[in-house]
Amino acid sequence: MIQLQKAFYQSCGGGAVCWKVFASDTMDLPHHGYRATKPRARAAPPSADPVLFEDTSFSGPPVAPQGYYSAEYNMGGATGGGGVNNLFTDPMASAAVMYGSSLASQGKDMVNKEISRFMSVNKLKYFFTVDTKYVMRKLFLLMFPYTHQDWELRYHRDSPLTPKHDVNAPDLYIPTMAFITYILLAGMALGIQKRFSPEVLGLCASTALVWVVIEVLVMLLGLYLLTVHSDLSTFDLIAYSGYKYVGMIFTVLGGLLFGTDGYFVALAWSSCALMFFIVRSLRTKILSSLSSDSMGAGATAKPHVRLYITVATAAFQPLIIYWLTSHLVR
């Protein structure tokens, strides 16, 4: 094999070209059991369509190193905290806050003062100082006043005891709750008779409220014109006038359960009980004041005049009860 190679090389003249041909031929010859091949570079895959323009839609700012956002957040937090601190340390801001607080306190005082001109909040709380025991005893007294013996008000250091501690003291809790119950019962009665409508229910509530206002105003005017000095306040008159709602509830229930006959029986019972209660309660307020003002301006009001006022107030209650309940029972 080597001799053939030498002979071929000599026949070609030993030039460089012959050496290249010789070398290329000898690479394809078998050598010791395997084929020697010349290493070739791997060809690149065929390229896609030529790019007409450069895509820059996903280009963005270079990614910041780790810790950039945390540093930015810390910087913002520090700046915000500094702004809040500067707000409270600023003299102008502190003065504005103090001025706003003073305006709020002045407005609150003005509101309380205006309310106090028409009513006393502390005195109003007195009429709502009740408990369950008092409510039960008072309701029994309103429906069965004939068995009650002691009608005098109790005092402690020249101030009357609260209704919670004295069943004879007037309150506004029972009249308020009775008024709401009466409106609900009226709506139920009208619904049973298929005559319910929001307008009728609103008219019923407004009429009942207006009658109480008229009654209180007439009572105050009568006491003023007759120069009767008594311990009755406006809240007392509202309380005594509002107790009629308990009798009205009893009357409407009697009419719904037992018809017309039950209505008139309940009306008679509640009217008599309320009249007796009003006379005995107002007697301690009006007639007992004779001794206190016998030497004053109230001396012109004779005892029988005071008695007439008390009886007239009591006699007026059945008429209002009938007027406000007769249309609910048919």
Image (cartoon, helix red, strand yellow):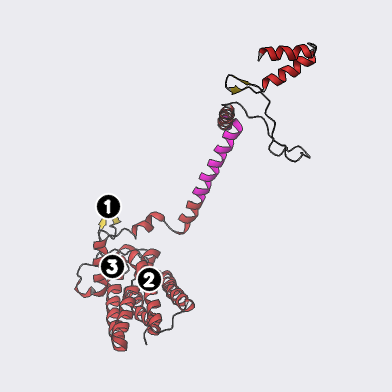
Identify the amino acid type marked 1.
Answer: Arg
Secondary structure of the residue carrying tag 1 is loop
The quadrant in which residue 24 appears is top right
Q: Which mark is residue 288?
A: none
Cα separation, mark 3 vs mark 2, equals 26 Å
Membership of 133 in magenta stretch:
no
Identify the amino acid type marked 3.
Answer: Thr
Q: Residue drawn 38% across and 68% down? A: 238
Secondary structure of the residue carrying tag 3 is loop
Residue under pointer 1: 157
Q: Earlier in the sequence, mark 3 or mark 2?
A: 2
Residues rendered magenta in the picture: 85-110
- Label 3 neighbourhood size at 10 Å, few (<14), some (14-19), many (20+)? some
Residue under pointer 2: 179
Task: List x then y, in percent, for residue 39.
Answer: 66, 23
Q: Which mark is residue 284?
A: 3
Res. 284 in view: yes
- Label 1 neighbourhood size at 10 Å, few (<14), some (14-19), many (20+)? few
Identify the amino acid type marked 2.
Answer: Phe
Membership of 87 in magenta stretch:
yes
Question: Which dot, 3 or 2, sits closer to the camera?
Answer: 2
Q: Residue drawn 38% across and 73% down? A: 184
In the image, 44 versus 189, the foreground residue is 44
> How would you classify the magenta stretch by its main secondary structure?
helix
